[in-house]
Amino acid sequence: VEDLTRLVSRFNQDYPGLIVQLDSILEGAGKLVDITDQTVGNVGQVVKRVDGIVADREEDIQGVMAELRVVLQNLKVLTTYGKILVAQLSEKPSRIIWGRGKKRINPSEEEILKSTEPVRIPSPAK
């Protein structure tokens, strides 16, 4: 009983200090919740703005992508024909200038565009 009395007495002495500390902790937690709410609200606004920008520019982005596709297709055809020309010049330059000799059967643009791998340079017809 004496130990219990001492424990109650000590608790009664420490109780006011604990209440002050507990109030301070709860006040800090309340401020943290307020700051978190503001941050979530700000992030929500940023997401809405970005979504609006992307939605507004979607047509522009699609147009640029379509244009880029055409440019890449043209580049694919151009580089393939460039490789063929360099191969012909390295074999016999007079064949291109004078048109003599065996003709190459070059791939068409459609064949070049349909291929998923680099088009091999055809060898001269025999």
Image (cartoon, rainbow, N blue to C red):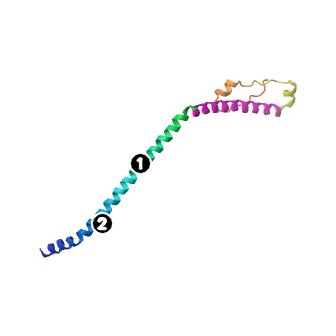
Q: Quadrant of the N terminus?
A: bottom left
Magenta segment boundaries in residue numbering: 60-89
Residue found at x 60% / y 31%: 63
Residue matched to label 1: 40
Q: Is residue 74 visible?
A: yes
5 lies above or below 117: below
Q: In the image, 104: left or right of 25?
A: right
Tell me the amino acid under the disc marked 2: Gln
Report x, y in % for residue 114. Answer: 64, 26
**What secondary structure is found at the residue carrying circle 2?**
helix
Report x, y in % for residue 57. Answer: 55, 35
- Taking depth in this image into account, of 104 and 3 the one nearest to the observer is 3
Q: Quadrant of the C terminus?
A: top right
Q: In the image, 53: left or right of 6?
A: right
Residue matched to label 2: 21
Real-space CA distance between mark 2 and mark 1, rounded to the nearest whole angstrom = 29 Å
Report if the CB atoms under discs 2 and 1 are less than 8 Å apart: no
What secondary structure prevails in the magenta region? helix
Report x, y in % for residue 49. Answer: 49, 41
Compare marks 2 and 1 and give the one earlier in the sequence: 2
User: Does the magenta-highlighted stretch encompass residue 86?
Assistant: yes
Residue found at x 88% / y 25%: 98
User: Does the magenta-highlighted stretch encompass residue 21?
Assistant: no
Residue found at x 79% / y 33%: 86
**What secondary structure is found at the residue carrying circle 1?**
helix
Tell me the amino acid under the disc marked 1: Val
Residue found at x 53% / y 38%: 53
